[in-house]
């Protein structure tokens, strides 16, 4: 099992191999010896990086967060000052679809680690911190776009995305990956249900004052006059 180029750091190689093993063999298949063998490392190499099983799991969680953060580049995220709900749906849809279409192994590993975190309080801390790297920016986005209840809306969005990914990776829809446009359409429906189909979205003008802007259409020129 080759998961990283030779130039990767030893810690990254160990973590990436651990994630691949979790997806392929489950939690029972993750051992220090198995990582050494799968990564093509001398015996004992993984123990030098992560001495205990807890340390190995924490390393895997941190690496998981790093790799999932790359699913959506910073320039692909919507700007709440200028973009509307459709832009937020487009960005979230792109990240979810990439997780489904090209990162199935990573998603399976996340499920293994999530279940293990329910039995290891010390791992729960690391897992929750990793999740905050996505939750906190999303909360900031929906708040800036005028959400009347950001916490509830963030929970709904993440629950929807997690549910879709589980269904299409490990659930009853595992044989089918939805197209990007399907994911985008579903997210737009969800967001419009949260914010209201015709709810104006606050945008920032050049002088720093808020103005209301209809997220769907511009007003006719006669109305503007």
Image (spheres, rainbow, N blue to C red):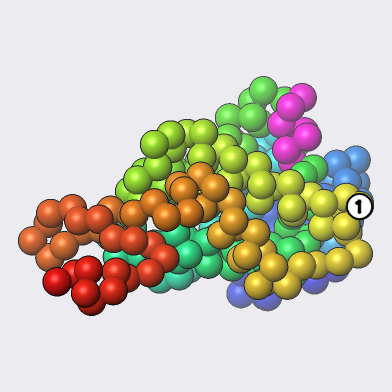
SS type, badge 1? loop
Residue beneath disc 1:
172
Q: Say if the magenta span includes residue 54.
A: no
Can the viewer see residue 183? yes
Position of residue 106 measured from the top left corner of the image (x, y, whole percent): 73, 58
Q: Quadrant of the N terminus?
A: bottom right
Q: Residue at x 34, y 54 (%)?
A: 200
User: Which corner quadrant holds the C terminus?
Assistant: bottom left
Q: Is residue 101 left or right of residue 148?
A: right
Quadrant of the image occupied by residue 84: bottom left
Secondary structure predominantly adopted by residues drawn in magenta: helix
- Magenta region: 113-119
183 sits left or right of 133 in the view: right
Residue at 74 percent of width and 64 percent of height: 100
Residue at 73% x, 38% y is: 114
Is 134 or 117 nearer to us in this picture?
Answer: 134
- Name the residue nearer the viewer: 203 or 12: 203
Could you say which quadrant of the image residue 20 lies in? bottom right
- The reply, left or right, for residue 148 in relation to residue 30 is left
In this rendering, position of residue 188 left or right of residue 117: left
In this view, 74 is above or below 18:
below
Q: Is residue 33 visible?
A: no
Q: Is 140 located above or below residue 9 in the figure?
A: above
Q: Is residue 139 above or below residue 102?
A: above
- Rendered location of residue 66, percent (x, y): 56, 56
In front: 13, or 166?
166
Q: Is residue 115 magenta?
A: yes
Vertical placement of residue 19 versus 223, above or below: above
x%, y% of residue 36? 81, 56
């Amino acid at each position: 099992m080759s998961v990283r180029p030779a130039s990767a750091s030893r810690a990254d190689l160990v973590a990436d191999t651990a994630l691949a093993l979790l997806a392929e063999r489950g939690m029972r298949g993750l051992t220090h010896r198995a990582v050494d063998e799968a990564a093509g490392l001398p015996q004992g190499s993984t123990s030098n990086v992560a001495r205990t099983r807890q340390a190995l799991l924490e390393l895997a969680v941190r690496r998981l967060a790093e790799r999932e953060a790359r699913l959506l580049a910073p320039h692909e995220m919507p700007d709440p000052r200028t973009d509307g709900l459709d832009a937020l749906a487009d960005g979230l849809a792109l990240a979810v679809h990439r997780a489904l279409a090209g990162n199935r192994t990573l998603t399976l590993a996340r499920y293994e680690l999530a279940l293990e975190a329910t039995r290891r309080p010390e791992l729960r801390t690391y897992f929750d911190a990793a999740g905050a790297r996505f939750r906190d920016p999303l909360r900031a986005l929906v708040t800036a776009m005028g959400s009347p209840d950001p916490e509830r809306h963030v929970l709904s969005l993440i629950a929807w995305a997690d549910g879709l990914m589980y269904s299409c990776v490990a659930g009853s829809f595992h044989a089918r990956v939805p197209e990007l446009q399907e994911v985008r359409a579903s997210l737009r429906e969800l967001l419009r249900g949260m914010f209201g189909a015709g709810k104006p979205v606050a945008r920032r003008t050049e002088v720093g004052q808020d103005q209301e802007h209809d997220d769907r259409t511009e007003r006719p020129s006669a109305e503007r006059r």
